[in-house]
Image: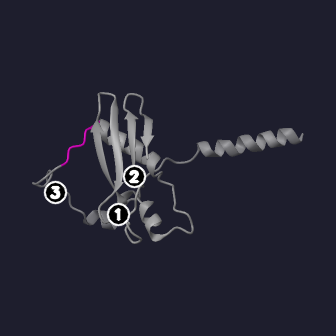
Amino acid sequence: MRRVVLLLSCLSLSACSLFQRPFRPAHAPPEESARFVFPLGFPPGEHTFIPATISTAVGLAMDDFLPRDAKPPKEATPDEVCLAQRSSYDVLAKALSDSVVLVSFSPKEGACVQEGTALDVGATYAVDVDGWRILAVQR
């Protein structure tokens, strides 16, 4: 009897994880959103075109490098809190071939330097864009 109860408990707990909602970014309240006016087309000036494979490879690598639900430790220093934010990193991406994209993350200039220069906090990913998986990580 105990085994049956234990088994049912384990199955019900694992089933709960299947019903988690996928991540969705926060949206501005409707009144704030209504005040934003889109320009007709993109304004003149420099634009950045990001091919779909590069964009998806960057997203996949970033989700591994800094998962959306990751939080800094409770006793984190100000620099550790800063480095736990996706907005603290610049991204360099390059297609090596039709199937492999290199994605590199490094702290943006001037970010997270309250305690001195942060060393060895970035990473470079090799992403297989055919199978949408991470081939290798260099830290």
Under mark 2, the amino acid is Gly
Q: Which residue is mark 2?
A: 122
Span colored in magenta: 48-52
Under mark 1, the amino acid is Pro
For residue 121, which quarter of the picture?
bottom left
Q: Which residue is mark 1?
A: 30
* Percent x, y of residue 51: 25, 38
Q: Could you tell me how far apart the alpha carbons at marks 2 and 3 are, in whole angstroms?
A: 36 Å
Tell which circle, 2 or 1, labels the residue nearer the N-terminal end: 1
Name the side, left or right, on which 137 lies relative to 91. Answer: right
Tell which circle, 1 or 3, labels the residue nearer the N-terminal end: 1
Q: Could you tell me how far apart the alpha carbons at marks 2 and 1 are, in whole angstroms?
A: 37 Å
Figure check: 64 above or below 70: above
Name the side, left or right, on which 49 lies relative to 56. Answer: left
For residue 12, which quarter of the picture?
top right
Q: Which residue is mark 3?
A: 39
**Colouring scheme, one of rainbow, by chain, secondary structure, one colour:** one colour
